Amino acid sequence: MLPLLLLGLALQEASPVPAPAPAPAPQLPRYAGAELLLREYLVLAAVDARGRRPFRPDAVLARHLVRAGSPAPQFGQRVRGETGEAEWSARTAGEDGRVGDVAWAYARVESDAARVVLARLAGASTLFVNGEPHTGDLYGYGFGGVPVALVEGPNELFVTGVRGAFRLDLAPCEEGLLVADWDVTAPTLTVGEAGRLDLGLLVWNASLAPVPELAVELLEGGGAFEMAPRKEPGLVPLGQLKLALFLSPHRGARLERPGELVLRLRISGHPDGRAVEHSLKLSVRPPDALAVRTRVSELDGSVQEYAVLPPRGLARERSYGIVLSLHGAGVGCAGQAGSYAPKEDFWIVAPTNRRPFGFDWQDWGRLDAYETLAVARHLPGTWQAPVFLTGHSMGGHGTWHLAANDPDTFAAIAPSAGWRSFDSYGGRPEGARRELWHAADAASRTEELLANLAQLPTYVLHGEADDNVPASEGHAMVAALRAAGAEPRSHFEPGAGHWWDDASDAPGAACLDWPGFFELFRGLSASSAAPRALDWTSVDPGVDAQHHWVSVEQPQRYGALFRVRARASADGRRLELATDNVRRLALTRPRGWEPEPPIEAFQLDGQAFAADFGADYLRVGERWSVVPRGADDEEKSAQRSGPLKRAFGREFWLLVPTMGTAEENAAALQRARHDAETWWYRGNGVAVIKEDRQLSATSLAYTIGRNLILYGNATINCAWSLVVPPEYPLEIRRGQARLGAREWEGEALGALAVGARREGGLFAVLGSSGPEADRAAVSLALFVSGVGYPDYVVYGPEVLAQGDGGVRAAGFLDHRWQLAAEPEARGR
């Protein structure tokens, strides 16, 4: 039976077919300052496939949310998408407010006044409030909501990206600054230690007034810590920032006993003049206990956590190996490290992938693992220690992924219940430009990097009855490694599922703390001698640029694998190298060869050279020549190249326009704010939003090396001319886009691009020729692992109906950031 509320909603809306005169409409759910659980919805089953793809059709987004003033859904209205047709139907949520098995849901709420409220959406990725997108608590972390703006009168709400079932309620919040105590990044403290304390604290601007600058003070440091008052970037209306705070120990202060330490902070800066105070409680643990520690990420300046389990009977005069252990989906780093019994000879180090779900240990998750490893190398007794890599489930995949893309960092690997790649586990949708998108995410293609994996001692563990990651994933990798000439060890536990333990009472979970792993690890030791023969494949220098004594700065063709095979003569005096798709490389003098060889000469693809370890070798056409070390600043390099996702690093800023119409500026700001929210939610990250006019020719000096992300277009964003070099081949303006000699016109064109800033670092364009393109951009998957965007893409509004078919042009730029000589992937 149709609920009375939704019957009234349906009859209020214009109907596409003749209908009886509507009955008097019942009152809408009313928000008057108290908590409101939404229970009455119109819902729609999926009519479009989702999946890991850069551009996906979305009939609901196109019909109701892209154009300002679009009509609301109606009861019984049919919607056709790429996979089928469905109609909007009425649904009453259960007593707990949960609604399941839907792709979209729509509701209306009457507010007695214009106000900011907390929208608490659990189990879905995206909430639209009067057309503005906000991030939901997709994974059920228990986060306390995001501030949203209600207008006086009716408000339209859409929910999408549902993971099983969702629940939505609106709760009051005091307008101004809001400290979100449900998302704090903080370490546990250790008795006897008092070093720098790094904290991450989430602050929202729960108002429609901009906050020019935040001021943070430490009021109480628990008798152990102090912090000078500091200024932090301001907040746009409804914006958030995960503050990175650094506290110093008082001189001579030591934490004497286990227990609890309380800190008290004050945050101010809102135009209303009010400050908020917040207390944090930190646990103090014995020195031999599992500990959560924090560090600062070079990607965005955020504070990230990791866990360490010290060796049993830690003695600072002895050496220990490092076991880098990667967690599964939904597991925290402390839970991962706590799945082991302490070892006498290893530190267990568990990075966090930036969140318990994070990025599948790809993209920024992979970089999180490396940043954690760099810190772990300073643990007692680990100087030049061998590093062993392991993980379970998603972490088992991460083990394959990291090792395939960097085989010389790890002494051995041990994936447990690991899946190979997105193409074997779950699959990625097909499309007109499938190969191009996959080339932009080539690090995902584990099977194409088997030659790298075959070099590593490996132990594969899997439960034969695993109903989450099939045991066929483990069997396939064992077979592939054997076919590549490797001899992996393996064990497939009969009858065991995804997470399992054995019958012993030993601490630690058997599917992770497997004795065979540590037998393998203990049988190996770090070698200071570089190998005399190499066979190395990399997807691009930005992922892996060096393998022992060979480094590659540039391939000939971006978006394609490159390979180097090398060997030394028996006496070590001569080298032979053969390359595929390599444009610029260098050699470092191999270490540890006995006797130390005076390398005199080498052959590079058949050309003879005297050995020069201070130069680069550059290939033009079929000939190599000796050139000075280091690529030109205007060229791509291992440190500065595409594809697009690489722009989200180097403490990037999001630059929004102020020179457009009110609608243009608002649409670009809403897009940037949603990107910042998504980056925070998925990656525990910091994304600072700044207005274009805050950047000037004189202030560019303060952004040297920083990545800058431009929204809007060159007509309305005055930072464009300061950031994008005039020779860059792509430009998007109001109503038009240009790529080289090609031009397109339209009010809903989009452009994605990455390039090099003259001041160092990268710039990226998340561009639009008009507000409709900004509103449609919520369908992009910028922060989804397994999805790749190349150096540039120009697309039209057709992507919401045709997916790849709406892409006008896409491809990789050459080493000088110009259109490649060969034709790029073209659309219409």
Image (cartoon, grey):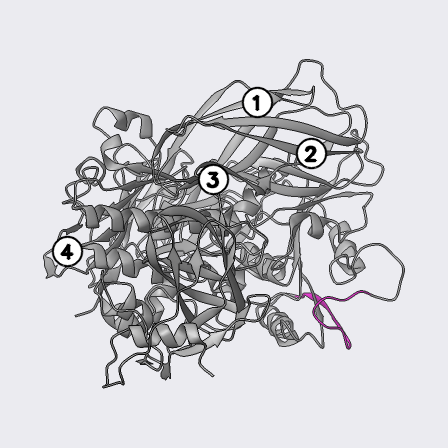
C-alpha separation, residue under disc 3 versus residue under disc 4: 43 Å
- Which amino acid, by three-letter code, is at mark 4? Ala
- Which amino acid, by three-letter code, is at mark 1? Leu
Asked if residue 495 lies in the magenta stretch, the reply is yes
Relative depth, front residue between 506 and 42: 42
Label whose residue precedes the other's in the sequence (4 or 1): 1
Relative depth, front residue between 200 and 23: 23
- Percent across and percent down for residue 550 are 46, 45
One can see residue 378 in this view: no
C-alpha separation, residue under disc 1 versus residue under disc 3: 23 Å
- Which amino acid, by three-letter code, is at mark 3? Glu
- Which amino acid, by three-letter code, is at mark 2? Leu
Residues rendered magenta in the picture: 487-501
The residue that label 3 is drawn on is 174
Label whose residue precedes the other's in the sequence (3 or 2): 3
Q: How many C-alpha atoms fall within 10 Å of the one at disc 2: few (<14), some, or many (≥20)? A: some
Q: Which mark is residue 218?
A: 1
**Secondary structure under the numbered disc 2 in the rendered image:** strand
The residue that label 4 is drawn on is 737
- Picture layout, residue 568 above or below residue 176: below
The residue that label 2 is drawn on is 282
Q: What residue appears at the point 49 percent right and 55 percent down from the top-left corner? A: 536
